[in-house]
Structures are given as structure tokens and as C-alpha cells.
Amino acid sequence: MASEKVTTFAEANFQSAVLQANKPVLVDFWAAWCGPCKMIAPVVDEIAHEFDGKLIVGKLNVDENNSIAAQYGVMSIPTLLLFKNGKEIDRIVGYKTKSELSGILNSKL
């Protein structure tokens, strides 16, 4: 189950919630049928708590929002894209542990 600190992104709010955000945004591209996506979900929740106030964290279901996934060239999931000032600044593909993901984010923020 997603944490209250994890936003749900969709085509309707992607522009305002991600591209026009006043903080960096981490978007988890996932699908319900994806095993590694289920494995990384609790890690994403922990990251949302750890980086609360510094980073907006959210999930985007690729089955329901395939045009955004296609626009950003997401070919495999889970893929996490880090946006800053409306631009993609990093791409993390596949499962990562919390310490791996925290290290990546700390180096970019």
C-alpha cells in the first residue's frame, strides 16, 4: 500500500505535479503485474519519508498512462526518473535497495 507521502501521478496531473513542481520529483514508473515493481514499492515509500520536504515522490502506472511512459522512453519497469526544474536529471532502472537509492538521490539533490 502506498504511503500518504507518495503521490499518484497520471496524465491529468503530470505537467503541474512533476514538470512545474517547485522541488525535485522522483517518479516511479510501475505496473500491478510487475514483480520487481512490488519489491521496490516499500523502498520508494521509505525514500518518500526520508526525503520529505526535499523531494516529491510519486508513482505512475504505465498501463494507465502509457503515453507518458512512451514520451520518456521507459522500456522496462521499474524505472525511476528524477526531475528537477521540469527536466529529467537521472534515470534508475530496476530494483535498488534503500541505501543504493538514497546514495543516488543524495548525489543529485
Image (cartoon, grey):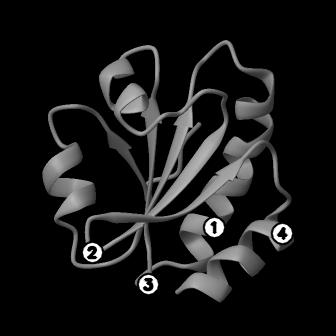
Q: Amino acid at mark 2?
A: Asn
Upstream in sequence: badge 3 or badge 2: 3
Q: Amino acid at mark 1?
A: Ile
Question: Is there a contact, CB below 8 Å, between mark 4 and mark 1?
Answer: no
Report, in whole angstroms, how far the alpha carbon at label 1 lies from the one at label 3. Answer: 11 Å
Q: Quadrant of residue 34?
A: top right
42 vs 57, nearest the viewer: 57
Q: Is residue 63 above or below residue 95?
A: above
Give residue 47's mark.
1
Mark in front: 2 vs 1: 2
Upstream in sequence: badge 4 or badge 3: 3
Mark in front: 4 vs 2: 2
Report, in whole angstroms, how far the alpha carbon at label 4 lies from the one at label 2. Answer: 24 Å
Report, in whole angstroms, how far the alpha carbon at label 2 lies from the one at label 1. Answer: 20 Å
Q: Is residue 102 above or below residue 15?
A: below
The residue shown at (46%, 23%) is 62
Q: Position of residue 54 (x, y in %)?
A: 44, 84
The residue shown at (31%, 78%) is 23
- The residue that disc 3 covers is 54
The residue shown at (34%, 33%) is 71
